[in-house]
Amino acid sequence: MKRPFHQLARFLLLTAGSVLFIVPLLWMVSTAVKPLDQTMSLPPRWLPTATTWVLEGQAVEVNPGAVPAEAGPDTLVSVNLAYQWVVQREGPNGPVRVPVKMRGDPQDEQVTVEINHRWQWVRGEGSRAQRSPVRLTVPDANAPPLAPGTARVAVIAPDGSLRRRVVPEAQLERVWGQTPDQVNRSYSVTQTVQVPRGELQRAYVPWNDRRDLAYTEMETRSAAYGQLSSRVDLRTDNFGGAVRSMGHFWRYLTNTLTLCLLTVGGTVVSCSLVAYGFSRIDWPGRDKVFLVVLGTMMIPFPVIMVPLYGVFRDLGWIGSLKPLWVPTLFASAFNVFLLRQFFMTIPRELSEAARIDGCSELRIFAQIVLPLAKPAITVVALFQFLATWNDFLGPLIYLTDQKDFTLALGLQFFQSEAGGTQWHHLMAASTLVVAPVILLFFLAQRVFIEGVSMSGLKG
Amino acid sequence: MSSQTAPAPAPTPNSTRRSPMTAAARRRLAMGLLFISPWILGFAVFGAYPIVMAVYYSFCDYDVLRDAVWVGPLNYTDMWADDLFWKALWNTAVYAAFSVPLGLMLALVVAVMLNRPIAGRSFFRTFFYIPSIVPLVAVAMVWMWVFNGETGLLNYGLSLVGIEGPQWMADEAWTKPTLILSSVWQIGGAMVLFLAGLQDVPRSLYESAEIDGASPLRQFWNITVPMVSPVLYFNLIMGIIGSVQEFVKPFVMMPGGGENRSALLFAVYIYQNAFEYNNMGYACAMAVVLFLIVLTLTWLATKAMGRHVYYAGE
Amino acid sequence: MGSLCRLYWISLVLAAAVCMAACDARESQYTDDGRLVVSYWEHWSGFEKEAMQAVVDDFNASQDRLFVKMLSVSQLEQKIILATAGGRPPDVVGLWTRNIASYAEKGALTPLGPYLRRHGIEAQDYIPGLWKQVNYRGFTWGLPSTPASVGLHWNKRLFREAGLDPDRPPATLQELDAMNERLTVVRVQRGGQAQEVRYADLTEAEKNARDFTIIRMGFSPHEPGWWKSTHGFWFGAELWDGERAITCDTPENVAAFAWYAGFPKKFGVDNLKKFGANFGASFASPQNPFLDERVAMVLQGVWMHNFIDQFAPQMQWGAAPFPSSDPDTRSYVTHLDCDVLCVPKGALNADAGFEFIAFVQQQENIEKLAMGHRKFSPRATCSQAFIDNHPHPYIQVFIDLAQSPHARSQPQMPVWVEYNEELMAAADRVFGQVAEPREALQYVQHRMQWKFDRSNKRWELTGDARLEAWAQADQAAAAKEGSP
């Protein structure tokens, strides 16, 4: 009679436990798709929303203030909205609306505003046109005079070097600043200009995008609650934003994958060789030496951290990826142990028979043992992949140039720069680092679970 | 699991006898050494040499830029006088003393619950296991977010049941619990190991216990725990080694050791001395102490558990 | 024995691979158009980096032999030591003056004497307080790039609201504390209702109970809390005797810490912590508590103007020297700090690296850089146009502060990083009321004197040889100079 009750209690406990275990990860993903304003809202919202208000015939994304619990459609609520002052300017493809920074009083006849632009040099035509940002350079006294209709510009070449060129003015195009990103470019120019009042307009911008747009201002108005509509709005562009904010995301990813490839290869080759030596060949003292191998598992990394740094320094490897992968060519205790356990289960008769046939040890290793040990090798490869993907202390110590960073280190760097404010980007970046691991887990779930089980045998 | 029952390689007469080796034995020795030569080389360069040098540097004043200068036991006497060393040691001891048993207990309990057939078993296993493979840096990020004193999920959850949560990461009294709680999250590896161990426990043992009228708790203590004791031993050793060198989470979550250095763990302090203050000699002296601690704890654990570890095959 | 042979082959290939990986020689790099690449690591990112990039671009455009590649490096202080120790430093590195003593003593930097002579750069070109900071043990180790002094910034609107004269900042610390009480707004329960009240208007009982929530503060010492270790400067304190003694438990230092401890005593530790819980990382954002008007006065650097401009352009604000404990004998006290450009030891292209540094030092270039950083020029004099065009309305205040005889900098000692950390930790203990100011400082005194002694002992062992080596390098360079 007590059975079903026990069963149910166990089920409920397990459910509660696994929910607790998975909630932090879900919270991470949920924050990753929120706009910044909603990351800190209490009570926590699991799904980000966007509220819109039709204003001047245009649906504007706004930020409603506190809504009373018994609000009817006619209740007035305060609503925050964001807008830019814009002026019309002539762009390369017709007129564009350019955001400006209000410097004076918008009621004046002539309003003082700040406007931002940069130049780009267009080579070729149509879709094949190449654009590079340039800076108009001040003519210096020694330079030969310019032909009319040409301009001297400084341009950054693809290799990063800076060159001066004389180009036809017709090939220069003015790009008006749109986002802070563009505004902050080193080649952009900010000018203070007077604009007739009539040319200034207000343009509403989506509330949750206001931080990413230049020169936005905010105001609060009242709206009838019924006029507002809400919907779920997943901000998947946070991932793009996180990739951009991290700076060298793709470099980090490439470095990490390169390292994973090298370490997995190195580990599999070296550890299987060594494990073979410890399991399939009987030599005097073998098991004693193997105890030493097991013993090395107990050496905490911090113990050898400093001298190891000295070793790599003497080799001239500091600031390169080598300290992170070359050691895997020399086998690691844990993986040797795993493989040895597995190799021991392969019947000895197989190799004995091969030996009698005159096969060399290497041949037995490569043609008999290795094919049979595929499951174990997969496990070792997986574990090594995870270890490399997750490693933090190694990269922290050995890598100096940001372009060499791995994802884990890059994530920490991003956090130390942007932590505390940009939780949405931070969580998006974390999600990007975590996702491949979880994906891998689901693809190879059996291997994982069996691998872990294998590692504990007769520990 | 088959490997457990596989017979150990029968010792050949040659390997046990002390008499001069036969040509065949010599050949096998050469072959064996050749196969393990990558490990020998790697251990020499990346294991043994650094350990020896760590001991040597621990008696030196050394900052990587200048040559090491022998100063005798100065680093050790300094360490004795260094409050922060003791504080870091204490912090680490508290961290390990709570996180290891707590983690082991929880892992075992979850494993026992999962061991019997139940609906959704593989889902549960997956959920409990996944956190343990997530990159530690990302784990630290997530916990910083969850433990945030103002807008964190945890304090919100507590407020629902009427508790005003503490400033987890900004309050001296709560920094270590923060680290301990976040470490308990990653018990997946230990849990799966227990699960594997449990599956080798013969059902018949429980059945006969039930006939004898033993309560589930008694069954747990008298059958389950002894039967998984090898796994318990393995997890304990790994847990101890892992927790005394815990680095990533405290380093990322509470840089500099947190409020009043209440979360300054030993490995972080070694790192700071080595790479922030460039007192490499001092860092090495601490590293040597860390190594001795690990050896002692392992020895103690072996001593304490050794008699109780039960191996099925023996 | 065929298998043996093959195994040897494998090992050979492996070994060869490792050797090849190991033996990529360090050599100078060139751009496609044949310019020598000068690598330059900088700790700045964001708009400050852009400002330097503009100067770098100018340098690259000014000649066709060299090409400076600037990299923004995180955690630069550690990375540069690791890279220098690893034998792969950049040619130029942008550090802080606080690094000079420690790095010079460890031999991580190149003494610049001969280079300075070659380019005719002299001490009197610079603000004296800054020149002092780039020199250590009689050698010059770097040249200033962007200096910064700190001063009081106040919000005029909040002053007006509190009934204070918006154009009169506090002149003494006592006045600052009094104004703080007027400017601070708290929420208290009165008759079962929550009310927002100025701290000055609280009853004595309410003040003593400290049972309130802080809504706004006049001045909060941990916003931003970056100068906790050097608050003593405003009390006339010194952190060391300039030679071998740490002096952080002198009465002046204790007074500074006691002033700091006064805040939690008055407002309650938990209240302050709660109020400041989210400040930490929001500096460069609209959530900065000064910019969103949650704090009315801050001690901030010359750069603050830039963030006001960016995130709170409507704010009415002023800047003035932060008041000292005794304005009669000490006015215009500031913490003067500076970024420096150095050549690491073992740089491949030290000459080329210095050529770039010298270029940055030219008046027009350094002013362009300073303008981009919204700071002032480290040179003793600057052009009138620089002052006239400077977007900072109070730039003169900060220049005067930097030139003032009471401008102080962190001590030029190799253990400053740890000293600073200890002082910060002591300040936290005092703030959390777990230690009395004197007790906390005596602890730091004891601990740091011990560390400083060690560092000095180390110098005694190696110092003479090092000084000689530096002097020799200097002479050799001078001789090389004279021969052609």
Image: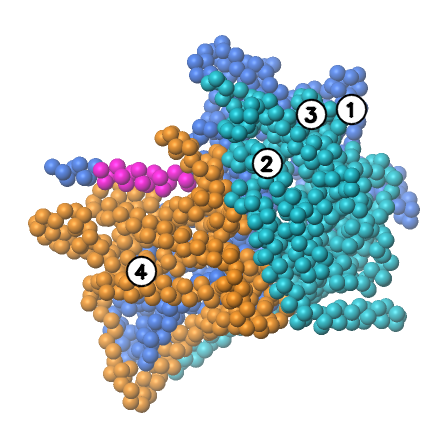
Discs 1 and 4 carry the same chain letter? no
Image position, residue C436 (x, y; %): 56, 45
**Residue C311 in the image: above or below residue B211:** above
Q: Which residue is mark 4?
A: B234
Q: CA distance from mark 3 to mark 4?
A: 66 Å
- The color chain A is rendered in: blue
**Residue carrying label 1:** A112
Chain identifier of the orange chain:
B
Looking at the rendered image, the quarter that the C terminus of chain A falls into is bottom left
Q: Which chain is cyan?
A: C
Q: Is residue A44 left or right of residue B127?
A: right
Q: Residue at x 68, y 38 (%)?
A: C299
Q: Residue most toward the top?
A: A74
Instruction: Indicate the amino acid at tag 3.
Output: Phe
Q: Nearer the viewer, mark 1 or mark 2?
A: 2
SS under mark 2? helix
In the picture of the structure, the residue carrying the numbered disc 3 is C159
Region in magenta: A9-26
- Which is more toward the observer, A268 or C98? C98
Residue at the (33%, 49%) spot, across then down? B102
Residue A41 locus on image (x, y percent): 49, 29
For disc 2, the marked residue is C263
